[in-house]
Image (spheres, rainbow, N blue to C red):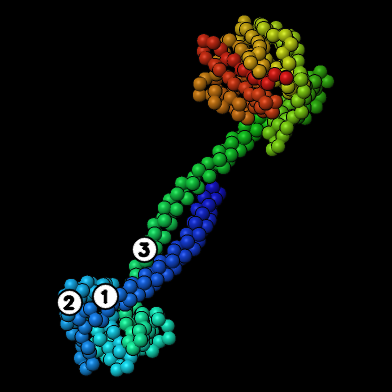
Amino acid sequence: MLKAYRRRFVAYNMLLVGVVLLIALVFQGLYLYRSAYDELQNTMRLIVEPLGGARMGVFRFEGDGAPPEKPQEADGRFAQRDERRITQEGILTVLYDKDNDTYTFLGRESFLDADALDAAVRAAAAEADDFGRLSELGLYYYREDGADSCRIALADTAYLSSRTLKNSLTLAAIYVVTMALVWLISRRLSKLAAKPMEDALALERQFVADISHDLKTPITVIMANNSILRSNRESTAAEREQWLDSTDEAGKNMMHMIDEMLTLSNLESVGRSVVTAPLDLSSAAEKAVLQLESLGYERGVEIASEIAPDVTVNGNAEYCARICSGLVENALKYEPVGGRVTVTLRTDRKRAVYTVRNQGSFIAPEDLPHIFERFYRSDKARSSRGGHGLGLPIIRQMAELLGGGITVESSEGAGTAFTVTLPLAE
């Protein structure tokens, strides 16, 4: 599924960029063609307009055969200057006498034979526009009219065609190279875009595996107890009571896990918000310690508290009670017999700091980054202690909804400390 998603991502990206780039290059090609067309027109105009027949050598051509390669020179300096101008870009220039129907070829050489030159000069002279194309002859012309004569510049259309072809090939190469780069970049971006989905699918698979494991045990117990009851129909009520109690305990365990899953799902819902009000966090912390002292006594764990009085936060009574009692209960669960759990509450600037530390157990460094993940259990500390791995994720989500956060520190010498910070009330 992810491979198909990545392929679609690359295809859509290539299509979008390809269409936009193609449109841009088409407009660029049209602009370059128009620029070359205008450049040809301006060049032909600049060649024709400055010419003065009285100051430079000319050759009158009236007969058959090719025109001579070089005009007669009346003034070598001016002729050399004008020859350099009139031969640039493969453009030839003639002086056409309207009255005598004769023309004078100006330049070093001609790319046309006598018949083609004769036809081009007379066709250009007959055109209505000063600049245009002689389609049948494959030439562009520019004409500067005078009183009894006109000056005509002729250029082969192959010049503009070659420029257009060269520009087209350049733009095509740019398109191919750009699309190759876009393809490489799109593949890289597809990996980055698919990474959250891969993580989500991995988390989903882990979630299914974890919940299947947690549901399998109580369901197995229930089915086993029912099988025992059916196979011992003649057993006494007292004997049946133990199997019924075991079934009841397994059902309660399943209900507790489902309730926690629903609670966490509700807390993680998009747009979830909670109404807060000034709340005495000191009272909630003290209440949690008092309620769990008996549990600590049963497990042989001492609970010590250092709770600052009158610490008021912007909180929610249900959330604060769950945070305070949940962290203490979690610490008692993993503290060995004869250990000690310390509960402290203090203020730091504009925040309340609630810390629960159990000194006799620690969390491995590789497990710390995952400690707040749903259903997570480390092999050393959480695999055989009961619970479903949902308590800490619920506490973290509640703390964040109240505008605070939770952190954990753990080492073999100092034990494990969970710290919740909440904003103080104004």
Tell me the residue that label 3 is attached to.
170
Q: Which element carries disc 1, helix, strand or loop?
A: helix
Q: Nearer the viewer, mark 3 or mark 2?
A: 2
Q: CA distance from mark 3 to mark 2?
A: 44 Å
Mark positioned earlier in the residue sequence (3 or 2): 2
Above or below, 203 against 60 in this view is above
Q: CA distance from mark 1 to mark 2?
A: 16 Å
Above or below, 224 against 25 in this view is above
Q: Position of residue 148 (x, y in %)?
A: 33, 88
The answer to which quarter of the image holds residue 206 is top right
Q: Which element carries disc 3, helix, strand or loop?
A: helix
Q: Give the crowd class for mark 3: few <14, some 14-19, many >=20 residues within 10 Å.
A: few
Residue under the point 35% across and 86% down: 147
Can residue 405 be spotted in the picture? Answer: yes
Residue 327 relative to residue 87: left or right: right
Q: Give the crowd class for mark 2: few <14, some 14-19, many >=20 residues within 10 Å.
A: few
Residue 165 relative to residue 218: left or right: left
The answer to which quarter of the image holds residue 160 is bottom left
Q: Nearer the viewer, mark 1 or mark 3?
A: 1
Looking at the rendered structure, the kind of residue marked 2 is Asp
Tell me the residue that label 1 is attached to.
86
Q: Nearer the viewer, residue 258 or 401?
A: 401
Q: Quadrant of the C terminus?
A: top right
Q: Position of residue 127 (x, y in %)?
A: 40, 87
Q: Position of residue 129 (x, y in %)?
A: 42, 83
Residue 298 relative to residue 165: left or right: right
Residue 278 relative to residue 190: left or right: right
Tell me the residue that label 2 is attached to.
75
Q: Nearer the viewer, mark 1 or mark 2?
A: 2
Looking at the rendered structure, the kind of residue marked 3 is Thr
Residue under the point 63% across and 30% down: 374
Q: Nearer the viewer, residue 166 or 281?
A: 166
